[in-house]
Each structure stands twice: as structure tokens, then as C-alpha cells.
């Protein structure tokens, strides 16, 4: 597996981004512990927010400025949001969240959506850095999930048909195959957000 991106914390912006990442990780760790399927449902719900927010705000920025040059950023962010949405669909089929967990998901999405909208509006660089750190943590989380599946601690069930079709996997693909593909997506999102944080 490719090594995780470990960005050096070099300024106040990075420090804040890392602090927020640790805060959200603490909450996820306390609430979900080792229930990785349920953890993925909530985290992917939140993960689908930043790309949509960033893409929308960059779109409006382009309209206000009446300039081109924002297209690649907009498309990349919207593609990220769509990819994270699909991750959510996969893990909903696997974890089958309860009504309480679905309410928690909606609440988390609403609160984080508002928070990230205003954060990106004022501090886009810090926002991208924070999501880069989020994605680094997601890679670590999926790596641990994969290890438990491969060791037999978690049953290596069949991958959902939706995931098989989305990733063009073999018809007998397993949960471990899905986790590997999702983890690869998160690595890409990490690289993308860290790059935008450096370029802004």
C-alpha cells in the first residue's frame, strides 16, 4: 500500500485544520469504536459535503469574477462529492443502519454542512487542508477495517452489487475488494485537497 500523506504542520492554518480533524476523530472513535461498517456510514455522509460545498462556492466565485479558470477545480470537487456519496450507498447496504443512526447521520450532515460552508467561504485554504487530513484519517481507518476483514475478525461478505457495478469488480467480489477500492479513492481525495491547500 502506498504510504499515507503526512503533511507537516507549518502554520496556524494547518494547526487548526489538524485540531479539527483530531476533534472529529475523537467523536467517531468514542461513538463507533470498532463498528467500522456503521462508522463508514456516518463518515461518508459527512465526507460527501466538502466537495459539494467547495464546488458550489467556486462556481459562484467564477460567476462573480466573470472569469474562466475555475472549471477543473469545480469538476474535481463535484466528482469527489459524488464519489463519497457512492461510498455511503455501499456501506448503507452493508451496515444497515438503524433509525437512530440514520437520524444521527442527518444531524451530522446538517451541522457539518453549515460549519464547512462558512469555513470555506472565509478560509478555503484551511478548509482544503482539513479535508486532506480527514482523508488521511479515512485511509488509516479503512486500512484497519481491511486488516480485520482479512484476519477473519470481521466476516468477508459479498460486496454489494451497486459497488460491483460502480467499480467494475468481479461478480464474486468481497468486502475486502470494496474496501481496497474505497481506500484508493480516499488516497486520491487526500492528494487533491492537500494540493489545493498548497496552491491557494
Image: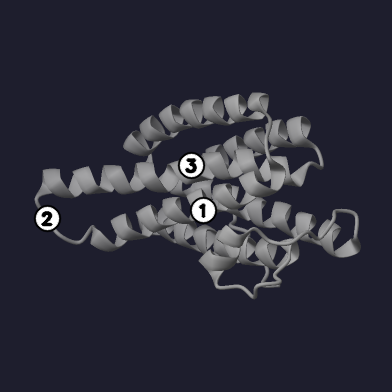
| N-term-proximal mark, 3 vs 2 | 3
Up-down relation of residue 99 to residue 124 (above or below): above
Residue 51 can be seen in this image: yes
Tell me the element at label 3.
helix
Q: CA distance from mark 1 to mark 3?
A: 30 Å
Q: Quadrant of residue 42?
A: top right
Mark 1 closeness class: few <14, some 14–19, many ≥20 residues within 10 Å = some
Q: CA distance from mark 1 to mark 2?
A: 32 Å
| N-term-proximal mark, 1 vs 3 | 3
Which numbered tag is attached to residue 13? 3
Residue 9 can be seen in this image: no
| N-term-proximal mark, 1 vs 2 | 2
User: Residue at position x 70%, y 70% from top?
Assistant: 173
User: Residue at position x 55%, y 63% from top?
Assistant: 185
Query: Horizontal placement of 33 versus 130: left or right?
Result: right
Mark 3 closeness class: few <14, some 14–19, many ≥20 residues within 10 Å = some
Mark 2 closeness class: few <14, some 14–19, many ≥20 residues within 10 Å = few
State the residue in front, 74 or 14. 74
Q: CA distance from mark 3 to mark 2?
A: 28 Å
Residue 47 % position (x, y): 52, 45
- Are the residues at dot 1 and dot 2 in contact (C-beta closer than 8 Å)? no
- The residue labelled by disc 2 is 67
Tell me the element at label 2.
loop
Q: Quadrant of residue 25?
A: top right
| Quadrant, the N terminus | bottom right
Eye-nearest disc, 1 or 3: 1
Residue pushed farthest bottom? 170
Tell me the element at label 1.
helix
- The residue labelled by disc 1 is 86
Amino acid at each position: 500500500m502506498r504510504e499515507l500523506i503526512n503533511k507537516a504542520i507549518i502554520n496556524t492554518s494547518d494547526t487548526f485544520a489538524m485540531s479539527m480533524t483530531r476533534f472529529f476523530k475523537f467523536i467517531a472513535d468514542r461513538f463507533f469504536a470498532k463498528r467500522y461498517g456503521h462508522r463508514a456510514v456516518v463518515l461518508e455522509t459527512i465526507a460527501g459535503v466538502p466537495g459539494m460545498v467547495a464546488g458550489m462556492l467556486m462556481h459562484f466565485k467564477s460567476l462573480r469574477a466573470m472569469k474562466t479558470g475555475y472549471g477543473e477545480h469545480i469538476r474535481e470537487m463535484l466528482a469527489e462529492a459524488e464519489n463519497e456519496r457512492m461510498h455511503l450507498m455501499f456501506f448503507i447496504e452493508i451496515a444497515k443502519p438503524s433509525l437512530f443512526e440514520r437520524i444521527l447521520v442527518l444531524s451530522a450532515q446538517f451541522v457539518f454542512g453549515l460549519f464547512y460552508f462558512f469555513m470555506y467561504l472565509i478560509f478555503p485554504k484551511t478548509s482544503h487542508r482539513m479535508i486532506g487530513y480527514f482523508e488521511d484519517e479515512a485511509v488509516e481507518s479503512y486500512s484497519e477495517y481491511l486488516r480485520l476483514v482479512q484476519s477473519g475478525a470481521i466476516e468477508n461478505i459479498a460486496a454489494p452489487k451497486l459497488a460491483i457495478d460502480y467499480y467494475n469488480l468481479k461478480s464474486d467480489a468481497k468486502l475486502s475488494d470494496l474496501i481496497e477500492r474505497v481506500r484508493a479513492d480516499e488516497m486520491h481525495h487526500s492528494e487533491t485537497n492537500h494540493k489545493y491547500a498548497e496552491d491557494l
